[in-house]
Image: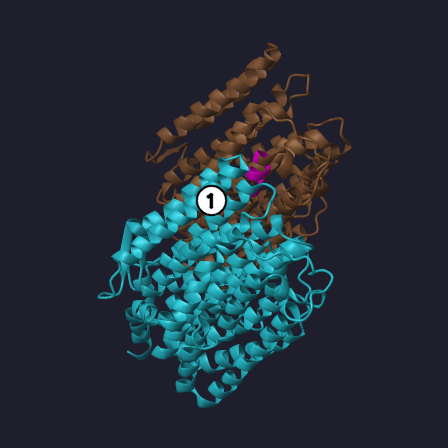
Amino acid sequence: MITGLLIIFPLICALILFLLNTEKWIKIIAVAGSVTQFLISAYGLFLFTTKCNCQLLLYLGSAENLGISLRFGLDGISLLLVLLTTFLIPLIILTTIQHRYRNPSALYGLIMLMEMAFIGVFSAYDGMLFYIFWELALIPAYFICAIWGGNDRIRITLKFFIYTFTGSLFMLVGLIYLFFRTPLPHSFDLHSLTSAILSSKEQAWIFLAFFLAFAIKIPIFPLHTWQPDTYTVAPSGGTMILAGIMLKMGIYGLLRFLLPICPIVMQNWGFIIIILAVVGIIYASIIAIRQKDLKRLVAYSSIAHVGLISAGVFTMTEIGLNGVVIQMISHGINIVGLFMIIDRIEIRLKTTEISRLGGIALKAPFLAVFFMIFLLGSIALPMTNGFIGEFLILLGIFEYNHWIAAVTGITIILSAVYMLRMYQQTMFGEPVELTSNMKDLTWLEALPMIPLVIMVFWIGIFPGFYLHLAEPAIKEMLYFVHG
Amino acid sequence: MTTLIILSLLGVFVLAEGILKKKSWQLPTIFLGLLISLFATIGSWNSNAHFYNEMLIIDNFAVAFTALLIFITFLIFMFAGIYYAAVQRSLDDIFAIMIFALVGCVIMTSFGNLIMLFIGIETLSISLYVLAGSHKEAITSNEATLKYFLLGSFLSCFLLFGIVLIYTGSGSFNLAVIAQYTANNTNHLSPLFQAGLFLMITGMAFKIAIVPFHFWAPDVYEGTPTLLTAFMATVVKTASIIALYRLFVCGFPAIHETWETLLWIMAVLTIIVGNFTGLYQPNFKRMLAYSSISHSGYMILAVIAFNSRTANALLFYSAAYSIASVTAFGILILIRGTKGNDQFSSFKGMAKTNPLEALCLTIALLSLTGIPPLAGFMGKYYLFMAALEKGYLWLVILAVLGSAVSVGYYFKPIITMYLKEGNGEKFVTTISYKTAIIFLSILTVILGILPFLMMDLL
C-alpha cells in the first residue's frame, strides 16, 4: 500500500507541476510535495520490521501473456535506497529553487517524475517493471541535462543517452532470454527469475548483458567516459540527482539481480571485475589530481568511490555487502553535499576553475566548514559516514583477497590527496580578486546542507541502525551465493 | 466481406459527391463511412467466414488487422482537412482513390488465395501510383509517381510470375492446398516451385520496401504529398507486411527452413541499412521514410519467428508504429505548411512557440525509438519476446543495436525543438488539429501503460 503511494504520489505532483504557471507556486508545490513524499517513506520505515525479509508488498495482478506481474515490495536495501531518494530530492529541490531557471514547471515536474522512476526501480519485484522504470528514469534525466545544461550540452547529453540506452537494451535482451529459462509458467517475477535454470555458459552471457547496463550506469572503468562530461554540463540539481541517486540504480541492480541470478559467474569473474574496479579507482584518482575544475574533480572522485563500492559487491561477503549498503548511502549524501557547495561557489563567482579561486575560508567561513565536513566524509575520515562504508568494504575485500585489499587501501590515500589539495587551493590562502567580495551562506542556503551534515555524523557514529535494517536482505542475497 | 462492400460503396459515394459539387460533405461522409465499416468489421469477430471457394477468409486475424487499417486511415483523414485547407478544387478523386487503396489493403489482410493476393496488391498499387502523382503541379510528385510506377509494375510481374510458378508445383492457388502440398513434399519440392517462392519474396519485399529492394521508397515518399506519404508509410506498409505474414504462415509453414534464412538476412539488412542511412538524412520527411524502412525490418521478425505470439505481436507493433508515425507526419504537415520546407532547422524553437505540438512529436518519436512506457517499447518488447522464444538470439541482438542507432536520428528533431533557439515564429494550428495529435499521443501512452488491452486478441 505504502509502496504504491510512494510511486503514485510523485507522479501526481509531477502532473500538477506541469500544469502550473506561476513560479512561486511551482516552487512551493515542489518543496511541499517532495517533503510529503519523504514523510510517507518515513512512515514506511515506521511500518518496516526486520523480522521477515520482504516487506511492504504490493501486488496489483499480472498480465499473463506478457509475463509481467505488477509486484512491488521493499526489503531492507530497497527501503534504505528509497529513503535516500526521498531524503535527497527535497534537499536538491531546496537548492535548485535558489536558481532562476526558465520554464520551472517542466524542471520540477521532471524531477518529480524521476523520483517516481527511482522509487519504481528500487521497489520493483519484477524484472520487466524494473526495466521499465529504469528506462523511465533516463528520459527526464536526459531532458533536465539537455535543456538546462551548460555549454556543449547537446553533444554530451546525447552521448550520455545513447551510452546508457544501449546498455539497457542489452539488459532487455538478457531479461527476455532469462524469461524463457524460468520455470513454467514463464514470468518476470523476481522469484521466478532467480529460480531460472541456466547452464554456466548461459549465466555468463546473461551476466554480461546485465552487467553492461549496470556498469555503464555506475559507471565502472572503462565505461565511464560519459560521466565527467555529463556531470559538468548538467545543471547543478541534475548533477546531484545523477550522482547522488541515479548511479545507485546500477549498484542496486547488481545486488538485486546479478547476485541471485548468476552467482556462479559472479564468483568466477568477480576477481576480474574487482581488478577492473581497482584499476578504475587508481585511474580516476590520478585524473582527479590533475583536474582544474571543481565539478570535474568531484566527478572523477565519484568514479573512484563507486569503483570501490562495486568492488565491494563482488567480494560477496556479508561484511563487504554491509559496507556496500552503507557506502551507497554515504556516497549519495557526500557527493550531493559537495555539489551543493560547488553550486554555491558557482552561483557567487560564476566559475568553478580551481586556479581562479582561493581564500574562500576567510570570506565565507560557514561555507568552508560545510565543505570540510562533506570532504572529510568523502575522504573517509573516522567518525564520518564514508569511513564506515569504506572500512567495511575494505574488510570484505580483505576477506576475499589480502593483496587486492592492500592495493585498494593505498588508493584511499589518493582520495585524500586530490580532495585536500582542492580544499587547500580554493579555501585557504589570501582571497584573490575574484573571491574578495564573496558572501557567506545565507540561512536558506545552509538549510538543505544541515540535514546532510547530520547524516554524515549519524552514519559515521551510529551505523548500527542502518546495518540492522539491511541485514536480513543481505543474508538472503548471500544465501543464493553460498547456499 | 461487408467491410469490403461498405468501403467500395463509400469510395463511389465520395466520387458522386464530387460530381454533385458537395465539397463540404466529403470529409464527414468519409469519417462516417469509415466508422460504419469499422463497426461492421468488428461485428464479424469470431465469425470465421470464407467466401467464393476460400478466396477470402475472414478469420480473427483478418478482422483484427482490417479494423486496425481502417482505424489508421481514419486517423490520417483527421489531418486531411488541414493539409488540403488551401486547395480550392474538389478532392473527391484523391479521397476516393485513398479509400480504394484501403479496399486493396483489406483484401491483402484476408486473402485465402494467391489470385486474391495479387488482386489486392494491384488494387492498392494502382491507386498508389495515382496518389503519388496527385500533386500534378509539383515536379517531385511527378518524379515520384513515375519511379514508383515503373519499378512497381516491373516488380508486380515478379510477383505474378512467382504465383504462376508456385501453381505449377502445387496445382492450386489456394493457400490451404499449397500448405498441404509443401507439407507432403517438404524434401523434394520442384525447382520451379522454389523459384516461384523466391520470386514472390522479391515481389513482396519490393512492395514492403525491404533492403535491398528499398531504393524507391525514400524518393517516392519524399515526392508524394505528405498526407499520402503518411498513408503509404503506415496503412500500406502494415498491409503489405500482413500479406507477407499471411502468405508465409498460411502457405509455406512446412518449408520454413527454405525461406527463413533469406528473410533473416533481409530483416537484418533492413534494420541496419534503414537505421544507419536514417542518420544522414537532410530533412524530416526522408528521415521518416528511412524510419519506416527500418521498422518494416522489425516487423519481419514476426514473419521469421512465427508462433502463437507473433500475430498479436505484429498487430501491436504495427498499431504502435502507425499511431506514432501518423503523429510525426501530422507535425510534418504543420511544419511544411508553415515554413514551406521540412529541414531540421525548421523545428528550431518549436518547444517555446508550440509546446503542445513539440510534446506530442516528442512522445511519438520516443515511442518510435522504443522507450518505455510508450507503445513502441511494448511493441518491440513483445516482438523480441516472440523471436527469442523461437531462439533467434542474434537476430534480436542486431535488432536491438539498430534501435540504439535509431536514437541518433529520432532525437534530431527533439534536440532542435527543445535546445535550439528559433525566430519565435508560431505555427498556427486549429482546434481539430490539436485534438487529433493529442488523441494520438494519448493513444501512444495508453497502449504503453495498458498493453494488455491489445495483447490477448489473437
> The magenta stretch spans which residues?
B356-363
- Which quadrant does the C terminus of chain A fall into? bottom left
Q: Reply yes or no: does residue B21 show up in magenta.
A: no
Q: Few, some or many C-alpha atoms within 10 Å of disc 1 (few <14, some 14-19, many ≥20)?
A: many
Amino acid identity at mark 1: Ala
Q: Position of residue B60 (x, y in %)?
A: 37, 38
> Numbered disc 1: what chain?
A
Q: Position of residue A122 (x, y in %)?
A: 39, 59
Chain coloured brown here = B
In front of the other: B79 or A405: A405
Splitting the image into 4 quarters, where does residue B268 fall? bottom right
Colour convention: by chain
Q: Position of residue A35 (x, y in %)?
A: 40, 49
Splitting the image into 4 quarters, where does residue A475 fall? bottom left
- Residue in the image at 32% along x and 64% along y: A76
Provide the residue designation for mark 1.
A30
